[in-house]
Image (spheres, rainbow, N blue to C red):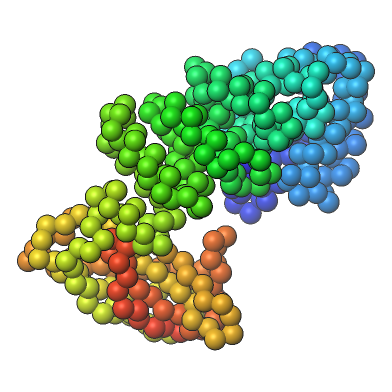
């Protein structure tokens, strides 16, 4: 399940489910179930929020829904569905993914309606909820417990007029969906779904198709290449869209320099290019400063190029770590030197931590890596 990002300095968990939003959930339910204990629901959930991270807040809210909707017995799910605003737009949703205020709704289905006698109603509710907040995490619990029945539902979703429901079909079956449980299905189980969706007019859907393929490529890149090649021959999709899907699907393998990925995208791995030694403006930057570098590329032919750069920690005290960054896609021509330059911010991110120590930087052209240049990162300056 994608968790989204923070705005400013407010943690995502406090944006997603906070006292105001818990109150809104209660009021929306009360509008269709007058006997709903609004004050009790709000009081119980809000009291626990400060100590909980996001997924625990979702679980705590859905547990409170279960407890306070118990008076409706088997009608609880119908009440929750009817409590939704008439449309996502009416709910104030301005993006494809939805609002976290509705994340407990699909969690409620996964936790309390994942039974054989409630299965049909549960699987009918999830595509409704996904229009308000993406429900792929909840679907995976059903794929674990009721794979055959859930796969039939997923196939129906792939043909739905609503692009958010079509996207749910792909996203829910990703082999390595982040922040979600694994599913006990073969790695290629979702390919029949992707075959229906790769030419979809919605980028929200095709992005999921590409992410799904990227998950597969981690363990079976040849299967991904075979799938992309098959789609290419059907001519159901234009070259621009297939290229987008392929780049996203092969992103990790491109960073690793896998020649077959570059070849599929039209980049010769053994392209006749020369790259001058990398020149680093300051060989001893501090954490938080910028690493400024450049090099020149020369070629004897007109060639499409996909250029990245690789920053590697080189400390003898820790395992060598590499991080690959995109630099440019361009066409090089003979007789014209191509300047490769970048000002890279040396700051820690979710995908890379910058600590003081020795590093190297290398240019990678069409997956082929050129000689490294060394630099030393110093402690961050205490002077602002």
- What x and y, as percent, mark residue 264? 29, 48
State whether residue 39 appears in this view: no
Q: For the point 46% across and 74% down, which residue is it?
A: 312
Q: Quadrant of the C terminus?
A: bottom right
Outermost residue toward the left?
335
**Rendered image quadrant of residue 173:** top right
Residues 347 and 122: in front is 122
Residue in front for this viewpoint, 369 or 133: 369
Residue 52 percent coordinates (x, y): 80, 49
Placement of 198 over or under 72, stated as above or below? below
Residue at 46% across, 36% down: 209
Say whether residue 110 is left or right of residue 333: right
* 319 lies above or below 98: below
Q: Residue at x 88, y 16 (%)?
A: 72
Residue drawn at 39 percent across, 39 percent down: 227
Which sits in the foreground, 366 or 62?
Answer: 366
């Amino acid at each position: 399940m994608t968790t989204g990002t923070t705005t400013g300095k407010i943690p995502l968990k406090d944006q997603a489910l906070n006292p105001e939003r818990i109150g809104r959930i209660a009021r929306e339910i009360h509008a269709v179930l007058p006997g709903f204990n609004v004050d009790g629901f709000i009081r119980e959930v809000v009291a626990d929020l400060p100590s909980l991270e996001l997924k625990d807040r979702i679980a705590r809210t859905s547990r409170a829904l279960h407890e306070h909707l118990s008076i409706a017995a088997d009608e609880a799910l119908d009440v929750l569905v009817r409590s939704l605003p008439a449309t996502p737009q009416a709910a104030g949703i301005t993006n494809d993914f939805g609002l976290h205020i509705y994340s407990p709704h699909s969690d409620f289905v996964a936790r309390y309606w994942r039974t054989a006698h409630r299965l049909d109603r549960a699987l009918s509710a999830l595509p409704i909820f996904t229009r308000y907040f993406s429900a792929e995490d909840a679907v995976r619990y059903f794929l674990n417990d009721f794979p055959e029945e859930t796969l039939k539902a997923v196939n129906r979703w792939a043909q739905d007029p609503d692009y958010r429901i079509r996207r749910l079909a792909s996203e829910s079956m990703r082999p390595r969906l982040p922040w979600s449980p694994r599913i006990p299905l073969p790695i290629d189980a979702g390919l029949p779904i992707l075959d229906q969706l790769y030419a979809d007019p919605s980028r929200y859907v095709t992005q999921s198709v590409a992410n799904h393929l990227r998950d597969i490529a981690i363990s079976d890149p040849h299967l991904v290449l075979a799938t992309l090649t098959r789609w290419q021959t059907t001519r159901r999709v234009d070259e621009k869209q297939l290229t987008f899907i392929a780049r996203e699907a092969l992103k990790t393998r491109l960073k690793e320099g896998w020649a077959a990925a570059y070849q599929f995208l039209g980049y010769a791995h053994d392209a006749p290019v020369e790259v001058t030694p990398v020149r680093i403006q300051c060989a001893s930057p501090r954490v938080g400063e910028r690493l400024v570098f450049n090099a020149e590329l020369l070629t004897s032919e007109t060639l499409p190029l996909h250029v990245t750069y690789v920053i590697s920690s080189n400390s003898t005290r820790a395992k060598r770590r590499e991080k690959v960054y995109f630099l440019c896609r361009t066409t090089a021509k003979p007789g014209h030197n191509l300047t490769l330059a970048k000002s890279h911010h040396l700051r820690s991110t979710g995908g890379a931590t910058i600590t003081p120590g020795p590093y190297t930087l290398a240019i990678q052209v069409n997956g082929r890596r050129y000689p490294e240049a060394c630099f030393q990162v110093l402690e961050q300056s205490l002077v602002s």
